[in-house]
Image: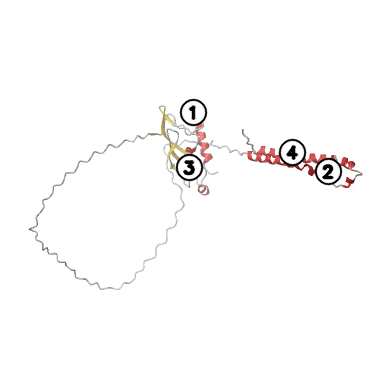
Amino acid sequence: MDLSITGSQFGMSMLLIAAVVIGAILLVRNMIGSNAEKLSEKYKGTASASMKKYPEANVFNLSSTFWRLGLVCSIGLAVLAFSWTTYEEKVDISGYSLDLPDDIEMESPRTAEPPPPPPPPPPPVIEAVPDEEVVDEAPKFKDQTVTKDVANTPVKPAEKPKPKPKPKPKPAPKKEVVDEIFQVVEQMPRFPGCEDISSDEERTLCAQKKLLEYIYKNIKYPTIARENGVEGTAVVSFVVEKDGTISDAKIIRDPGAGCGEEALRVVDKMNGLSAKWTPGKQRNENVRVQFNLPVRFRLE
């Protein structure tokens, strides 16, 4: 059961509650005022004639009734306040397109002017060193005379080296099966949300619209880019896997000032959606497809 109300409905409800409260006050006031003459005649000539307030006209007797009325009004205001809902504005994507040229050129990001070069170092100070006399010391020779009789020392025959064992043949490396990544297939991958449409062409257009609405609803213009007036189109490349998940997302065009990183963040966020992409198909089999997504940053 949807209890959400808009701002205009909330304002009308506030006016209705105020009207009920004011009406109740006026009703009680008129009732007491109409009985004023009757009460004066009733208590005329009695000891109670000098009373400033008659018991029938004492509004404090209705305090419990007014307390309940105020409680009902406060509960109604609380319910209306919690039910007040603001709806998001629709994203205008009429001027955007997912078409990209075949050759995507990398744009060099804008950078600030280089800082000035540091000042040159001070010239070296040459100090005069007094001449010192160098005394060459005579080299000392050690006695290296051999006193052992080398002729009578038996000579051991040289041992033949043992043959080295033959190395074991290395096992053949296992070939890793890597699924091919396609760029163009018979059925390109689609953003979720349009599976109930029967026509392929209408389903593709609907998926492109849903994708653009998701991008420009979650994108946040970087503060640095906004302050420096940076505009441009960032292009993020990613692979739609066979199960509809997103992998290998990377920036292939970046206007700078954090625009490319922001587009990459929004693309990585797609894996957290409740519904996954519809994978691409080639010969009725799910295949991995590379998808290039342009994200335009433009200041109003």
Amino acid of disc 2: Pro
Residue, far left: 152
Pick the front one: 182 or 121: 182
For the view shown, which residue lies furthest in the front direction? 47
- Amino acid identity at mark 3: Arg
User: Which mark is in front, 1 or 4?
Assistant: 4
Q: Which residue is mark 3?
A: 265
Where disc 3 sits, the SS reads: helix
Query: How would you rate the neighbour count of disc 4 (Cα within 10 Å): few for under 14, some for 14-19, many for 20 or more?
Result: few
- Answer whether residue 233 is visible to the viewer in this image: no
The amino acid type found where label 4 is placed reads: Val
> For residue 7, what is the image quadrant?
top right
User: Between tags 3 and 2, which lies in front?
Assistant: 2
Give the mark, 1 or 4, whose residue is nearer the N terminus.
4
- On residue 201, the disc is 1
Residue 39 x, y percent position in the rendering: 87, 41
Circle nearer the N terminus (4, 3): 4
Mark 3 vs mark 2, CA separation in Å? 74 Å
Distance CA(mark 4)–CA(mark 2): 26 Å
C-alpha span from label 1 to label 2 = 82 Å
Look at the numbered discs 1 and 2 and tell me whether their residues touch, using CB distance below 8 Å.
no
Q: Are the residues flagged by discs 1 and 4 in contact, CB closer than 8 Å?
A: no
Marks counted in the figure total 4
Residue 113: % across, % down: 46, 53
